[in-house]
Image: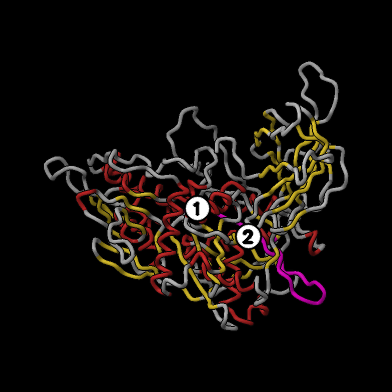
Amino acid sequence: MRFAAGIDLGTTHCAIAVAPLEVEGARPDVVRVPQLVARGQLEALALLPSFLYFAHASEGPQALPWDAHRAFAVGEYARARGADTPTRVVASAKSWLSHPSVDRRAGILPVGAPDDVAKISPVETSKRYLDHLVQAFEAQFGPDARLPDQDVVVTVPASFDAAARELTVEAARQAGFEHLTLLEEPQAALYAWTLAMGDAWRTHVRPGDVVLVIDVGGGTTDFSAIAAIEKDGALELVRVAVGDHILLGGDNMDLALSHLVRHKLESDGNVVDRFQAASLVHACRIAKERLLGDASLDHAPLAVASRGSSLLGATLRSDLTRDDLTRVIVEGFFPRVDADARPATRSRSGLTQLGLPYAADAAVTRHLAAFLGRQARAIEPFAGRAGGALLHPTAVLFNGGVMKAPSLRARVIETLNAWIQQDGGDVVRVLQGADLDLAVARGACMYALVRRGRGLRIRGGTARAYYVGIESAVPAVPGLAPPVSAMCVAPFGMEEGTAAELPPHELGVVVGERCTFRFFGSSVRRSDGAGTILEEWRADELEELPAIEVTLPADGRREGDVVPVRLRPQVTEVGTLRLEAEPLQPLKAGELWQVELSVRSSA
């Protein structure tokens, strides 16, 4: 093990940063990743776009220095091909990885692929991105420095549930990583900011501060609150709140812009078929990135080719103007709203096409208002400071490719300050100096160094308190289910790699037959300790999580027996909740049953 390595396995881009372990004070450097940027043209770039292109047989191999016969391309060339052949390109695999309603190990991507393309799973797609990074790392540092052998940290959205985290680890293991650590992306962004600021960061963040990390990337919107507190005379950073998993980001914006341009084209008498509509989304993404990246541009041209020859159809041409961009993205996705605004909901159709479960409300500002309102008391257990109707951050750190646009950052700060001042608080300050493309990879590498005692660690742990449902032993009553209480098995902030001690309870597990474990989560009950039992609760206090259906083996007992057990919960190193049930009278040494919150009955 020679390096600390941080991997940003992003929706839009992947990146890797490394630092030599034997060099005291070493800083993370970004590894440039060789990739195809055009047909037959290789270039090493700091970012590896998270796109995978299945080449047609007539194109020949997509050769790389380490694989001369590869039939697919990953990276910049794959992204560019999305505008020409969208049905042969996999995009947003990370969003699919967090989709709870599909089999994420099944071949479902690319959606709408032709018959000559063998579909692959979101897990396999993520594994191929990691494979590419592994080979790029070896190409730079030699075959004796395999990436899976290093001290590796891989980032995930803070709002990823246990299943998505476990599937990320599964993809990494398929790519050869036996040991790795997961880190939430907003924490990685803050680590990167402290790295960029050097020792001066302590003058910008002081005890009592609450840093709001606003991370809007290609596929998701993530909110996290990190408090700076004083403990034993020293500054300590504690992640105190995490938002919901919101599938809202650059992908949604590209789709909205494509609808606008399609309307322009059809108003001019053009017919846009389904294939061209898919290509138009990719073309709008490229035009959007050009306009957001260069304030001097008034418009960006775009073209969408026809599938047929010139006799059957011609290339469609239009442009995306800055006024279009402002109207659709700034006003559509970041509108000025009141602090009590909440995301709109809508009823869903009984039949729907296979696709991602995007957020029903596209307004990032409404989701932010909901997060700050729900977390109004988040800081109290740590600082004893009461807020108003919403959480009052004192500083904001932006992350994610979408937030590179100055107009979007300005709109968020303007709206946020209006809320806080109306609620009796002071305006926030913006933490400057972050690299929004590479911060997560650098921060993940920094975290690997921090774990070795080289820097201040952000205390995180579980973003929620977790509870298991316990059915009461009462006589059957017609039409009435037995009451269920909820026992806290993982308090809020329980650190990865730790176990909780539960007080003695008379509990039993059913063995030998199919049974259901009910779990609940709470982002607002922060003071419940391990073993706390709730007989009743408000609807906004506990959220029921997807049930886990399992058959615990009887192993010499009768089917349906209720075995008295002692529960032992632990949070694994990758952030999943494992509940062990140890029989009070085991039939053999070491006998126990395990249930993990990441298990899905469909898996």
Q: Is residue 224 visible?
A: yes
Query: Where the N terminus falls, by quadrant?
Result: bottom right
Query: Where the C terminus falls, by quadrant?
Result: top right
Q: Main secondary structure of the magenta part?
A: strand
Q: Secondary structure at mark 1?
A: helix
Residue beneath disc 2: 418
Horizontal and vertical percent for residue 139? 38, 71
Residue 60 position (above or below residue 442): above
| Kind of residue at disc 2 | Ala
Residue 592 position (above or below residue 66): above
Residue 568 is left or right of residue 309, and the answer is: right
Horizontal and vertical percent for residue 397? 59, 67
Residue 506 position (above or below residue 60): above
Residue occupying the point 78% across, 28% down: 561
Residue 546 is left or right of residue 75, and the answer is: right
Nearest to the observer: residue 340 or residue 12: 12
Residue beneath disc 1: 171
Residue 318 position (above or below residue 603): below
**Label 1 packing within 10 angstroms: few (<14), some (14-19), many (20+):** many
Horizontal and vertical percent for residue 386? 80, 59
Q: Secondary structure at mark 2?
A: helix
Quarter location, residue 307: top left
Residue 390 is left or right of residue 115, and the answer is: right
Quarter location, residue 506: top right
Horizontal and vertical percent for residue 525? 77, 49
Tell me which label, 2 or 1, sits earlier in the chain: 1
Residue occupying the point 67% across, 29% down: 514
> Does the magenta run of residues contain 345?
no
Residue occupying the point 54% across, 32% down: 347
| Kind of residue at disc 1 | Ala
The magenta segment: 219-239
